[in-house]
Image: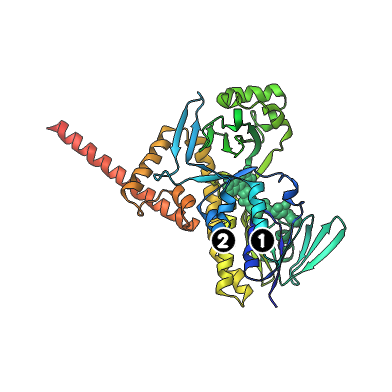
Amino acid sequence: MPAKYILVGSGLAGGLLAAYLGRRGYEVDLYERRADPREGNIVGGRSINLAISTRGIHALEQIGIAQEALQHAIPMRGRMIHDESGALHFSPYDVDPKKCINSIGRAALNTTVIEAAQRYSNVRVHFNHKCTDVDLDTATAQFETENGKLAARGDAVIGVDGAFSAVRKSMQGDMTNFQYDESYLAHGYKELTIPPGPGGSWRMEKNALHIWPRKSFMMIALPNPDGSFTCTLFWQFEGPRSFATTHSDDDVHRFFDEEFPDAVSIMPTLLEDFRQNPTGSLVTIRCAPWFYRDKVCLLGDAAHAVVPFYGQGMNAAFEDCVVLDECLEEFPNDRERVFTEYFYRRKENADALADLAIGNFIEMRDKTASKAFRAKKKLDHLLEAALPGTYLPLYTMVTFTQIPYAQAARRARLQDQIVYGALVFLSVVLIALLLRSIAR
Ligand SMILES: Cc1cc2nc3c(=O)[nH]c(=O)nc-3n(C[C@H](O)[C@H](O)[C@H](O)COP(=O)(O)OP(=O)(O)OC[C@H]3O[C@@H](n4cnc5c(N)ncnc54)[C@H](O)[C@@H]3O)c2cc1C
């Protein structure tokens, strides 16, 4: 008899994991607290669109759905920086103009992965089932449904239920050695809209990720296929100028007029959006271990939620699916070994990504506007072109390769040390030559 997996959460990673497990012939029951996204159920509380790059695309390719998922995606070839005067500066992501990240709608991607899972007759998806508790020893999950309570027992339960995971909560409650750390940024986020232009055209450069960096805060915008852009304002919750002190329509308008004058003129629904859309929080979650014996396991945000500034949370969650699948291939008869190996292969990388994501927040909001930043990016691209395969900028390694995150972070630190060392050495030689020529 094939093993039976109970999956909790059919978000991005849950759907994809169900497809991977279904392909291996396991019995899979996927439970989701929300209604079916195909019934027009908007995914609230998270971004409308998101950037998918090499790691995520690779995971989709492995199950044969990359093309289907990417058909409506919009390639973004670099950052379009909007400075305070409204002037634009374009900074490509890579020396190779073909390398781009892709703006993709969350709801459409969610539907694609769920439908991929449902193509396997051994996968069943149950919407409107909210997990309330998991009995770790018996791999039994408790659900609340419209028709009352239900218990589902499997050989293993996998928590793919996002940053506020109920499965993880049960592990926290019942495992004495469970380590848990959550930390919130002082910034929250709010989604706003730039509607399409005439005839569904884009009112700004379509193939770019737009950034309005303003030192302690920023706004970004990603294109959608219908000609609109989804903007996200990342701003302090508290403080003299913050979400907390911006109440009236006048406050909102004054802030946008001062900070984003070129955007405000193309945001006719700004006041409505600002009032109606929730202000989300940004959390980093680190925990360990991600498994309990051969009975329970965590994957995606449930195991390692990160802040969104590297555009890698979903990409990392998809990469988890690939690694878990590889472990299932290697140890088909030992599920505890599968969970253990998966955890050790991923944990260091998830921790490295959490640090990279926080670091990139500072880079995006503060440094992208500076000439020094643009000069460093140019130097990165020069070195990459001069030393192909030898010098790889950190952004390139994270976004356009599958080099494990921790290895990418270590390699970038080493590269920086060598480059700065060489620059210091060259400067000393130049100064010495100059002084000698003056002395003559
Ligand atoms: C503003 C923002 C922008 C982002 N941009 C990017 C980006 O550009 N690129 C990128 O790679 N990542 C991005 N991310 C991160 C990305 O959204 C997450 O990493 C990704 O959604 C994780 O997938 P998941 O399946 O683990 O969790 P989720 O997508 O959160 O899915 C969890 C699912 O579990 C369900 N669930 C929760 N609790 C229960 C329960 N008790 N019972 C049953 N079901 C339950 C939920 O309803 C949901 O469907 C962004 C995040 C935010 C907040």
Res 326 quadrant in image: bottom right
Which comes sooner in the sequence, label 1 or label 2? 1
Which residue lies at the image location 73% right of the left edge and 31% below the top edge?
Answer: 275
**Marks 1 and 2, how far apart in space?**
26 Å
The residue tagged 1 is 117
Q: Nearer the viewer, mark 1 or mark 2?
A: 1
> Is 126 located above or below residue 206 in the figure?
below
Res 166 quadrant in image: bottom right
The residue tagged 2 is 347
Q: Is residue 340 or residue 7 the one in the foreground? A: 7
Check disc 1 and give the amino acid type.
Answer: Ala
Check disc 2 and give the amino acid type.
Answer: Lys
Crowding at dot 1, Cα within 10 Å, few <14 / some 14-19 / many 20+, comes out as: many
Residue 423 percent across, percent down from the top left: 31, 43
Secondary element at image label 1: helix
Residue 153 percent across, percent down from the top left: 77, 69
Secondary element at image label 2: helix
> Is 178 located above or below residue 369 in the figure?
below
Q: Is residue 227 or residue 134 the one in the foreground? A: 227
Q: Is residue 295 visible?
A: yes
Quarter of the figure with the N terminus: bottom right
Res 328 quadrant in image: bottom right
Q: How is the image coloured?
A: rainbow
User: Most extreme residue toward the front, as rendered?
Assistant: 199
Residue 210 percent across, percent down from the top left: 53, 35
Q: Is residue 180 visible?
A: no
> Is 260 located above or below residue 344 in the figure?
above
Name the side, left or right, on which 399 lies relative to 26: left
Quarter of the figure with the C terminus: top left
